[in-house]
Amino acid sequence: MSLFEKAIRIKEILEKRIDYIPDAAIVLGSGLGAFSNEIQVDAEIDYKDIEGFPVSTVKGHAGKLIFGTAGGKKIAAMSGRFHLYEGYSPEEVTLPVRVFQLMGIPNYIVTNASGAVNTSYKPGDLMIIEDHIGFFCPSVLAGENDERLGIRFPSMSEVYSKELIHIAEKAAENIDIKVKKGIYCYCKGPMFETPAEIRAARILGADAVGMSTVPEVISAVHGNMRVLGISCITNMAAGILDQPLTHAEVMETGKMVEEKFSAFMKEIVSLL
């Protein structure tokens, strides 16, 4: 069965649960699932109960697809995502994006927990992603192209919508929070990066580093969706501080900023 056929089948399953096209699909990264509490729920479905859908295996990813209202808009929220390092294929990692694309959802808002490469950042900062470096990411568009999903050679000159970035900046201003804007660098994981890799990323212009997001947003752009990316800086990247990195630190910082993050996401959605 092709990716298109798999996505159509899941789309039809989901459309039996809701009777509207959400204004946005939102992916909630590690430690950022608290935003789901802001949603007036119409339907909540465990990933394991959606035939053909992958299942989250990472701590801090609830593994639920939620449809409902937040900020006065209808949304679909993924509480937890899938990573290549979990052993999933590029097709499996990006399957939810294709489902949202075929449902007609126009906006894809992706969030993640990231390590700070930029030494002026600190844990708890929120960063609007302006662009990304995905050299280390296997191409999720490799293989025969299905024209029903997108063109063979999509432009990546504006992966992150300037219009949505402007909306996010306005949202931050409206609720009086400070946000950064920067470049996100993808690394394969699940091991944290080495100090040498972080130095290299800094030379290339990266401000934050993480193990997700790039595969998904490439598929979203291929599918002609508008993309907004928000990173929560949960730790200083390797070599900046004289201490080892842990996933527990990522989760703790996510908990610390959940109120600010949730307010920011709600305001963004309200302005769409």
Image: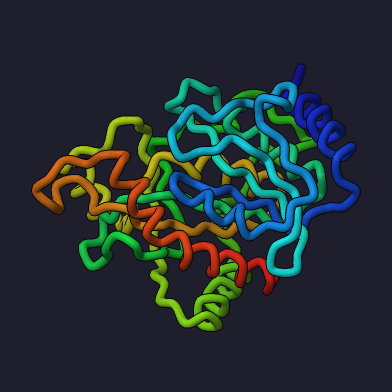
Please give the name of the residue rendered at 49% of the width and 27% of the height, measured from the top-left corner. 57
Colour mode of the rendering:
rainbow
Given the current orientation, which residue lies at the most extreme top position? 1
**Viewed as shown, does residue 117 lie left or right of 48?**
left
**Viewed as shown, does residue 26 lie left or right of 198?**
right
Task: Note whether 170 is above or below 126 in the view shown.
Answer: below
Task: Note whether 64 is above or below 260 in the view shown.
Answer: above
**Viewed as shown, does residue 249 lie left or right of 175?**
left
Foreground residue among 64 and 238: 64
Foreground residue among 173 and 260: 260
Q: Can residue 130 be seen at all in this image of the molecule? A: no
Choose top left, top right, bottom left or bottom right for residue 227: bottom right
Please give the name of the residue rendered at 22% of the width and 41% of the height, measured from the top-left corner. 245
Q: Can residue 82 be seen at all in this image of the molecule? A: yes
Please give the name of the residue rendered at 49% of the width and 59% of the height, measured from the top-left corner. 230
Indicate the position of residue 236 as horizontal and vertical percent values.
23, 53
Indicate the position of residue 253 as horizontal and vertical percent values.
34, 54
Given the current orientation, which residue lies at the most extreme left position? 242
Please give the name of the residue rendered at 69% of the width and 68% of the height, measured from the top-left corner. 71
Q: In which quarter of the image is the C terminus?
A: bottom right
Indicate the position of residue 93 as horizontal and vertical percent values.
57, 31
Indicate the position of residue 226 as horizontal and vertical percent values.
66, 58
Foreground residue among 84 and 158: 84
**Viewed as shown, does residue 267 lie left or right of 21?**
left
Q: In which quarter of the image is the N terminus?
A: top right
